[in-house]
Image (cartoon, coloured by chain):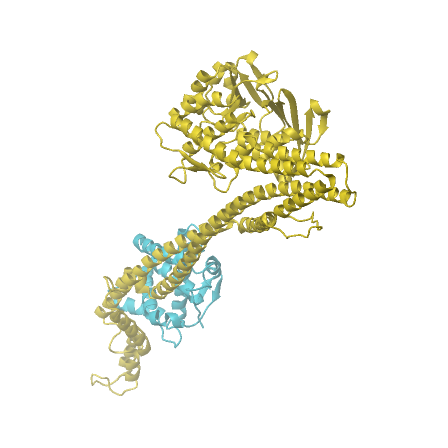
Amino acid sequence: MRISLLGWSSDGMRCPDVKVDLADGMEPSAVSLIQMPNGTGKTTTLSLLEAAMNGSATNWSETEVRDFRRPGSPTEKGVFVVRLAVDGKPLTFELTLDFGRGTAVYRTTNPGSGGVQPNWVPLPSVRRFLKPEFLNLFIFDGEFAGKLFDQRQLEAEYAIEALCQLYVLDDVAGFAEEAWNRKAKQAPVKTEAGLAKLQESHRALLKRKAEVARYRENAQVGANKLALEIEELDRRIKAKLSGGAQTRERFDAAQETLASAANKLTRVSGDAMQALRMPIALHTAFGRDLVQLKEGLDKLRLPENSSAQFFQELLEEVDCICGREMTEGAREEIRARSERYLDAADAGTINALKADIEGVGEIEGEGSPNAMFAALVAELATARKEQRLATQEVDTLKKQLKDAGETDIDAWEAEQVLAMEKYEGCKKLLEDIDAAGEELDEDEVDVETWSMASLERQIRAIGSRIAKLTDTLTVRRQTELIVRILKRTGELARAEIKRELIDACNETIAKVLVNDPLRIAGIDRSLRLSGQSGASVGQTLSVGYVFLMTVLNRGNNDLPLVVDSPANPIDAGVRRRIGTLIPKLTKQFVGLTINTEREGFVPALQAASSDVRYLTMFRRTPGTLPLMAQVPADRATVTESSVLVHDQAFFEGFDIEEEV
Amino acid sequence: MAYFRLRKDAEKWFREIGDAPPFKVKWDVYYLCLMAGFASGRSSESTAATDLTERFVEEYRPARHFIIGLLVIAELKFTGVNRTDKAQVRELFKKLVHPNGTNDLTDFGMRRMNAYASGGYEYLAENREQRPFHVEEFLQSYPALIAKAIDAG
């Protein structure tokens, strides 16, 4: 089968409105390079391409649907149409997203089966290649190549299964069973007894076997995906919890520091206030003034040794203290002069004042009250600074804790629990399917069993009984032989194909990665590298390319390889070699590139293929207005939001470094 | 009986910090204003005020003689009394100081004390951009304001 991507169109989606043609008629260019600067919607385009082709959008949540709405756009609907050619016949999927309702609907146009149909309904023969697991093989971004090396992924195994058409062996086995069924039905019957019932059971068991096989495949894929999802959620939760725990520890420590700083501040401010209550501590000038006051009083002999009371009492005496008679004139003079003296109490206060001043000791200098107060003020400043810093730290961490959002963790944990339940369900189903199953009596039939082994035993047993009754025993044995041969063929083919693929891949890798001893050692579920468990992004992408292209080339199905940023992480030398190989290994290569990828890659593609389509797309913004002058009008399609130029010279000269 | 009196506007001006530790008594606010008055030599007597106490409160009893001494010093400066004239100095003491079992101030002495507290508040209010909101900040800046007033004097 050959599937070609003829083009796509987008209208009203987050990516610019555009119609991209990769083919003239039904034959696409061997190489199509679509240069899209960052911000032009490469990732969106790739997501919509996949969704349109694999029919998965109907399972999207309302939020997922609305994620494709163009910011600020009033448009309620977005339409993405992808045009394919399947063995030269057109097949179109139209995906419409209703942003208001948050829903997705499909329409399928398949001229071979009745024109336009509602829903995503490709023909069964095509459906196999449009499954998400399969689409990932030929529409991918740089990350996909890494999955080929992930032991938990089935991508490498699936690639071989699908692209090398090993499923055909199962189809043949089914055809053989059908053929015998038909034969048995047409054969003359020895006895009718129970035959109809046996045939009915046989059909039911075959149907059940196919059903269980589908379940098994889905359960395996589901379990792998869920395991990854659980692991990713676990990583996110641990990262956040670990970040959160660290932040929480820092927050607690910061709070302790803050409390300690606050205590210190309270203590120091209390001490400072207490010291401040003594005027001589507040400023040395107060102390000096007080000392000077005392010294002045001392010089003035204040308070006097005699108090006013002494003279008052003297007035009562007959003789003055000097021995002379106390005359009335003398008494009057003594009374008048006594008022100039301080009374005893006043003197007491002044003496107390002088005594206190005398007791102060040092007014200035290291041990003075003022020096001690100044030290407390300095300590107060330090304590305030410490408290301020501690407060800032607490506030910052509080914000971090708030920003970290425990709601995220809660939601992830809920998701993880749900994923775990689903994972356990898948694992249980796989265990049931892989179990030996109950041994049944000859007449017993269990079409409800999940055990594949049991179903196969029952099919064989009933088949033999039908064969005996219908006298088609030989044909039955031949059928069973064919089925066994086909099963064994599949096993041998897989092993042989893997061996050949490894050889072919390693041969190519040696040419592509000339300076690198990287080699593929084996293919299990994933690719296993020789002597190393991991590889750089460039190595991964290079080996991934080689593997996919080798598988694509080896199989009988031709599929387009659509890659986002095909050469971004690899160096110029590897780009040249990959670029040279691509046209030889696939009939259609579509690369969504940025200008910095051109070097090395584009000239190599150009040299290796005569059919390269150069497209350049950019958004119409005030910033890109100057570019319009360089756009060749006859080679450009201009919409309200974008410009698409189909021109090699423009492609090669295009240079937008920044996002537009 | 004469009371230590705190201007109402000063009380209001200090309201963010005056009622919480490390302030213990209303007298703390009075004292801060008083020291600013002594440092700046400013006194004013004609404002509505609240009676605080007759006595020096417990927290300030150890400093009471220094406070009285500073009042005398301020008044010596204010009145221009000759410090070497014993009679004048004694007279000033007699006007201001009188042991009365409560505050050792005459009524006049108390009036002048309150006047310096009032003038000190005015000095503080004029020399700070805004009233104090954080006691630690005020305690840190207050000594600088006092120093500034003394240096200016």
Relative height, residue A219 to residue A318 (above, below): above
At horizontal 30% and vertical 84% (from top left) the residue drawn is A313
Relative height, residue A316 to residue A61 (above, below): below
Relative height, residue A6 to residue A236 (above, below): above
Relative height, residue A130 to residue A61 (above, below): above
At horizontal 71% and vertical 36% (from top left) the residue drawn is A181
Q: Nearer the viewer, residue A178 or A77?
A: A178
Colour of chain B in the image: cyan
Q: Is residue B24 visible?
A: yes
Residue A616 percent coordinates (x, y): 52, 20
Using residue A276 as the reference point, say whether residue A221 is left or right of it.
right
Using residue A216 as the reference point, say whether residue B70 is left or right of it.
left
Return the residue found at the far bottom: A318
Res. A638 image quadrant: top right
Residue A236 percent coordinates (x, y): 50, 47
Colour of chain A in the image: yellow
Q: Is residue A75 visible?
A: no
Q: Quadrant of the N terminus of chain A?
A: top right
Q: Nearer the viewer, residue B65 or A536?
A: A536
Residue B81 percent coordinates (x, y): 29, 62
Q: Nearer the viewer, residue B105 or A526?
A: A526
Using residue A283 as the reference point, say whether residue A36 is left or right of it.
right
Residue B115 percent coordinates (x, y): 41, 62
Using residue B127 as the reference point, say whether residue A629 is left or right of it.
right
